[in-house]
Image (tube, rainbow, N blue to C red):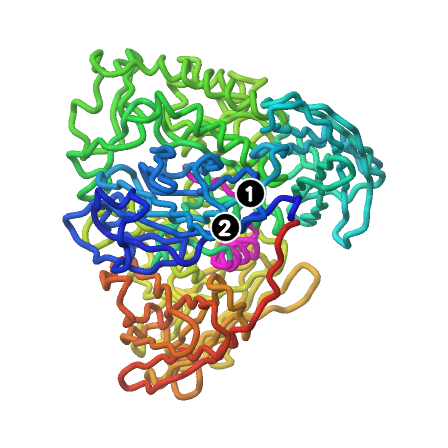
Amino acid sequence: MNKGRIINHINLGWKFYRGDEPSAWYKGFDDSDWRNVTLPHDWSVEEPFSEEHSSGTGYLPGGIGWYRKSISLPSDLQGKRVFITFEGVYNNSQVWCNSYYIGKRPYGYSSFTYDITDFISFGDSPNVITVKVDHKDIADSRWFTGSGIYRDVYVTVTDQVHMDTYGVFVTTPEVSEEQATVAVDVRLSNGNAKDESVQIRNVLLDQAGQIVQTVNNSVTVSGESIKDTEQSMIVANPKLWSPDTPYLYTLRTEVSKDGELIDHVETPVGIRWFTFDPAQGFFLNGVNMKMKGVCVHHDAGGLGAAVPAKVWVRRLEALKEMGCNAIRMSHNPPASNLLDLCDQMGFLVIDEAFDEWEGVKNKWSTGHNVYPPKHFGYYEDFPQWGEIDLKEMVLRDRNHPSIIMWSIGNEVDYPNDPYCHPYFETMTGNNDANKPAAERQYDPNKPNADRLATIARRLAKAVKECDTTRPVTAALAFPELSNLTGYAEALDIVGYNYKEHMYKDDLQQYPDRVTYGSENSSSLEAWLAVRDNDAISAQFIWTGIDYLGEARGWPVRVAGAGFLDTAGFKKTSYYYRQSLWSDKPVVFLTAMKADEAEKGSRRWTGGDPYWNFEAGELMRVSCHTNCEEAELFLNGRSLGSKKLADAPRLYLTWEITYEEGTLEVAAKAQDGAIHTCTLSTVSKPAQLQVKVDTAELHADGQDIAHIEIQITDDDGRPVYTADHPIALSIEGPGEIIGMENGNIQDLEPYSSRTRKAHHGKLLAYVRTTTQVGEIVVTAEAEGLGTSKVTIKSVDIVETVQA
């Protein structure tokens, strides 16, 4: 009989029905004609875009869906406790086990666990888990949410005496380069009626699996009760966690009874310390540093909200290469595997709970800031569930060394949305000419903004009941008022959204307060406000990656402010930001017609990386670089050198006359090394080049590969302007789960297996089944022929936690 903890992910083999089926809660319901789906699953991206849906959520539908899953537990587990955990269901989920109603969870971003011990069967009798998801109100957010069980689900089996859910909490109360104290709080639960005496052992392992330190003690837990116990250990010469060196230890916590192991949990541990100073900013492990951050949402284009971890790996690698070292999870708890990756890859994290409290925000459904808005959202559930959901986030996430702040809210103080205040009578002017006049005036019949301070104090208290090792923050949209109402005062450190112009005066007015940029534009000025001010420790740019929703209006379905597009491809703005943030040499060349150089948004930074124009056209060529100077050549002729120190926008430009051939820039770094970048005139599109990021996948039904398709000319050079429709097909034990091109106006349904290239590229995601064999993916486009790639799907040795 297995005496330890067993954790089984149950993402495979679910039945799904799109629509309402009121009888589906019943264990004996016939679901044989329902679809087979694999979790994570988002049904919204399986359906067509339509203007009748909300622009805020990407013109994709919501509705109602039902899921059912049959699971069996062997008879030798009889007498154990059984829990089921859902890491994210959007939204208004209801769960049944064997026809017994277990509970509901309105908030679509919370992880939640149910104890189903009283309802489960062991042996030959199967168990049926049923989940209803009710997402009828699709205009309930300002960005895409997804619909369905869009994160992992797992079953945990424990002894009657076991560690509680999130029952291990690791802190490092004292850290230096010479030694660190690692403290471990363990919460034990005793499901037996009698008292139980157990032994607790904590073992700290290094990355090689070698024991660093061990501590033991014995404890008695009263019958049918919970008991907290604490242990600590001293680690000599610890390897410190940081973005540059994200070293992780492993803490193995064991519970034994009468010398026999009955439970264990493994927790990654990062040893680090940090401080915020009102005048000097942020210090990590005693080193002053700037947080070069971006905000991210939880979707991935064609995959919707159901994003496998490997997709995040690819995206995070690109952000890391850009020089990014911090991420704000906007504006809701992220998937736990994303936080795991931030620990492993070295990102500082703001973990954020809400975009809305008890006051409903405007939800744009016919275009961003286009009136009239709709008013669905979490506000309906916040009074009952807000503190519960906030504590769930903190308890779940508090062992992640990457997390350095808990954010209780984003822009809940947005002017007149819905909170008003007599202060508004002093306001003159408004940036938004499209806003009705009433929205710019004081309305005593609206909720008073003073209320926000009361809620903020309550939420901050809830956070500190779970964790006192990190500051509580929030992202303020209207600090002019929140500084007066007491909302800002309720926070440990204060985030300003797009308010760089207030830094100077507010730092003088509130000299003992830590202020930082919680949301910022990607303008050069916004970065200089951080770079050149010791007191401002961070900026978090809106946004790191394009995301579905918050769209300006049909047919645009995506917010396109990211440095990466929805396919994770790098934009020109990526290289400009890299030249500002990265310590490694950056050289990137772009071109555009000179008469278009002043057009476009604030994020316009010099054109596109191609060299196909009309002879004699006046061109502006830009070089994004952090090298000291660069020389431009056209067909071998020098067009002059320029120094970065003389460039007010911190990138170099030349105005030249177009001629066919090769454009090259040679940049000289501080150490004298030369770094080059080339653009060449290409011929017409001629072929498809297909590459995959891995040659081998695991046949576990969950592993994925990224396949990039590039349109090239006869010489294999990318054709940036090509937009041919590309059809994909697959043979073998795999499936195409998504295709994405990054085009924010492409309305081709994501369920289609034909999609146009954008900037000459297309991305596909392939997932394995549970069968081994060769997966062959074929790409085909008219006039470009076909191209294939082969991936091996191989067996893995399944391991069960004992």
Which quadrant of the figure has residue 571? Answer: bottom left
Whether residue 132 appears in magenta in the rendering, the answer is no
Q: Residues within 10 Å of mark 2 (few under 14, many from 20)?
A: few
Residue 525 in view = no
- The segment highlighted magenta reads 310-331
**Which three-letter amino acid code belongs to the residue tagged 2?**
Gly
Residue 399 x/y as whole percent: 62, 37
Q: Identify residue for label 2.
A: 123
Residue 647 x/y as whole percent: 50, 53
Which quadrant of the figure has residue 174? Answer: top right
Q: Is residue 81 above or below residue 566?
A: above
- Whether residues under marks 2 and 1 lie with C-beta atoms below 8 angstroms apart, the answer is yes
Q: Identify residue for label 1.
A: 78
Q: Residues within 10 Å of mark 1 (few under 14, many from 20)?
A: some
Closer-to-camera residue (697/102): 102
Q: Is residue 737 above or below residue 148?
A: below
Instruction: Measure the alpha-carbon separation of dots 2 and 1.
Output: 8 Å
Q: Say which element carries label 2.
A: loop
Q: Is residue 501 left or right of residue 193?
A: left
Which label belongs to residue 468? Answer: none
Whether residue 326 appears in magenta in the rendering, the answer is yes
Dot placed on the residue nearer the N-terminal end, 2 or 1? 1
Q: Is residue 515 above or below residue 738?
A: above
Residue 429 x/y as whole percent: 25, 25
Which quadrant of the figure has residue 218? Answer: top right
Q: Is residue 668 left or right of residue 491?
A: right
Residue 716 in view = yes
**Which three-letter amino acid code belongs to the residue tagged 1?**
Gln
Residue 555 x/y as whole percent: 20, 55
Q: Say which element carries label 1.
A: loop
Total number of numbered labels? 2
